Image (cartoon, rainbow, N blue to C red):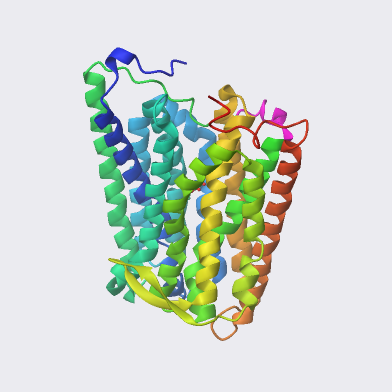
Amino acid sequence: MNSQYSQTSRPSPLTRWAVLLFVSMAMFGNYYIFDALSPVVDLLQSDLGFTYKQIGWLWSAYNVAAVCILLVGGYIIDRFGTKKAITFFAAVCLAAAALRAATPHFEVMLAGQILLGLGAEPLIVAATATLAKWFRGKELSFAFGLNLSISRLGSASADWSTSFASPLYTNWQDPLWLATAVAGISVTAAILYWITENRVERGNYQLGEADAPDKLDVKSMFSFSASYWYIVALCVVFYATVFPFRSFAIDYFQQAHGLTREAAGLLSSMLPVAAIVATPLFGLWVDRVGKRSLFMAAGSLVMLPLFLMVTYLPPGPMVTIGLPFIGFDQAPLTLFIVMLMLGGVFSLIPAVMWPSVAYIVSEKRLGSAYALMTFCQQIGWAAVPLVVGFLNDKYLAGPSNIDGYIPSMWFYTCLAALGLVFSFKLWQTERGPGSHGLETITTKSQL
Ligand SMILES: NCCCC[C@H](N)C(=O)NCC(=O)O
């Protein structure tokens, strides 16, 4: 596979950064649409009579669809190229967002979420392939970091919409139409990327080929090392804890802690906001000092008590939270501290975990390794909202019975405990003869 630009005919840095901007804007929309459902959870219940179980299904439908499409998404990207694939999948996300907003029927909304899973996850894979194509041999890690930060800005913006678009939150539908408009930005950005790449191709510039997009290589997947499987296991339980907690967080803060929707949105947005700033910084730090599995174990340890802290600790005094231009509101100190710590973990573990795979797996198997990891991630992430929705319904969780949320908080804690076990096993392995250098490789040692 030719993976290098020809030195004489490389596109200008400006073109490269324009591509990063367009692809990242497409990802911004992708993350916004996904997260736009969280702030309307209580409205779906009050206006449409949805149960927590049904809402759990809305989240899980996304993952089930993603699991299916991940098996063929790589082929589609390979066959049609990244510019067509990104535009196509962004258009699928737009259709999904419109379908989800169009009617009050659960089945139609479920179809919208399935369509979103079919569009959004392969769009992420196509975006990764695009960055690899345009930035290989250049500022690839930095480009990935910026791309993830802009994506997380999409998540944060969906949370902030409870403040900057608060007039829309008189009904369940208008915030979802806003998400559909944001999906339009995604499609526009994808088209701009297509035009840019067309110009580059017409100018006879040579672009490197991306790594083969993520495809599942069933034969070789069982020969990955123990360290790889510990990372996959951590990935599964980590995202199966954080993403579903985020999905239910705004509603949980409103119902169990009596916060306004605005305050709950601001509090929930602390997770992606912390990640926007801290993820690239943690990446730089780990590159300098190594100790990757120790960092993952430390992150898992910090996460362990957080769900019990929000459940059992006294709320403490009210503090002002928020950001200029977005808004300010009041929230209990305990929740603020917990979300700050969770934001730290949400920055640290992804910043260390995803790049660690590259030290463990040979370059030619990276595509399969990441595809398999994402595949497993989706399965865990699909199951947990169903369990949480079931537990909340079974124990009649709600403002008049806030103890009904305790079982789901213990469930998150059990998952976090499993994460600690897997990261500890990884750390043990990486300190022994089976080490891949996760603890020792640094930017200095590679010079
Ligand atoms: N809110 C969109 C979910 C993105 C899922 C994606 N497969 C993923 O895990 N990305 C890495 C991350 O940390 O966001």
Instruction: Give the answer, above or below, for where 357 lies relative to 251.
Output: above
**Residue at (75%, 44%) from the top-left corner?**
425
Residue range of the region highlighted in magenta in the rendering: 217-226
303 or 110: which is nearer to us? 303
In-front residue for pair 163/14: 14
Which residue is at the front of the view, 33 or 157? 157
> Magenta stretch containing residue 180, yes or no?
no
Task: Provide residue 134's location: percent of width, then percent of height.
Answer: 36, 27
**Residue 35 visible, this orientation:** yes
Estimate the x, y position of residue 215 in percent, counting from the top left. 54, 30
Q: Is residue 181 above or below residue 280?
A: below
Side of 237 where 340 appears, left or right: left
Q: Quadrant of residue 396?
A: bottom right
Q: Is residue 55 left or right of residue 98?
A: right
Whether residue 374 is visible, yes or no, is: no
Q: Residue at x 47, y 60 (%)?
A: 271
Q: Nearer the viewer, residue 429 or 162?
A: 429
Q: Is residue 259 above or below residue 187?
A: below
Which of the 4 image quadrants contains residue 412? bottom right
Give coordinates of residue 13: x percent, y percent: 28, 28
Q: Residue at x 66, y 32 (%)?
A: 437
